Image (cartoon, rainbow, N blue to C red):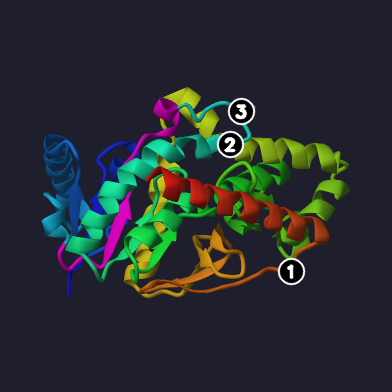
Amino acid sequence: MQRKIGVIGAGAVGTTTVGALLGSGQLDAEIVIVNRNHGKAVGLAEDMQHAAALSSTARVSAGGYDLLDGADLVIVTAGVNEKNGGATDRIDPRGRRVLIPDNAKAYSKIIPAVAAAAPTATILVVTDPPDPLADLARVLAPGQPVLSTGTVIDSLRFRAQIARALGVQARDVSAYVIGEHGTSNVYLWSTATVGGARVLDLLARRGDDVEEQKTRIRKAVTYGNISIIEGIGASQHGIGAVVARITEAILRDERAVLPVASYLPEYGTTIALPSIVGARGVIDTILPTLTDEERDGLADSAQILRDAGQFALASA
């Protein structure tokens, strides 16, 4: 049976998301693109349908929220992006959180429309900052499964930087970033490994200044989006691939472990931890073994996200 996916937003991230969904050639789905500028959605859908004709059985169309009826998953990418919203200042500790007022207002219209049209769909929040906006989406679509992309892209960037430092393939690095997708994120150096060996030990064995490497890598990951925006105008291809991977895990009920974010009562907010992802979003979360420093960092990140979630609700 062909599944139905809604993609809200036809900007850079929405476009690369649809492209990534089609690119695998494995997803048999109907993809409905909804955008405030309907003509843009129509053009994107037609262009993507031509691409799908080469290697995918997916169908791509454009329409209003009513076409989301029966959707299994709705992916929300719409909103003001980092460049246009002024979220590219490396010295501003708020990072992506400066986008909350504008994007919370957008979500106050988008999410009720999604909930009315597709009340049984899982909602995947991609718009920045995704974690506070997922908290808001939970309020606006009560009873529906909601998750955000969390720190999946951060963890991939972390692994890529470690791989570059050690001269190995990123796929052979096991390392996680948890907490906020933003400036309070927590790097789990204590459990980062390559081939079963601790990354910190491998760096030390090479004669590297370990603390210097940790600082360099943290900056490269935390501000990687800004470097990309400065180069090509939008951080889009990495997150598009991430959204496609999460989508596959949901539609195939894979129970894959990905550091997405979901609401965790013990933290009182939507926050990213390694999570088991299946048909209805997050099935369970896994709390890794943490050092005292990492545990304190996660608590600080949770407090920042609780405040940000309240700000999003007040801004909607």
**Mark closest to the chain's N terminus, 3 or 1:** 3
Q: Please determine whether, in this image, residue 1 is positioned above or below residue 10.
A: below
Q: Please say whether residue 269 is one of the residues in the magenta stretch.
A: no
The residue tagged 1 is 289
Q: Residue 272: x and y, percent?
A: 56, 59
Q: Is residue 86 left or right of residue 33?
A: right
* Residue ID at (65%, 46%): 184
Magenta range is: 69-85
SS under mark 3: loop
Inspect this view and state whether residue 155 appears: no
* Residue ID at (20%, 42%): 35
SS under mark 1: loop
The residue tagged 2 is 94
SS under mark 2: loop
The residue tagged 3 is 90
Tag 3 and tag 2, C-beta contact below 8 Å: no
Q: CA distance from mark 2 to mark 1?
A: 28 Å
The amino acid beneath tag 1 is Thr
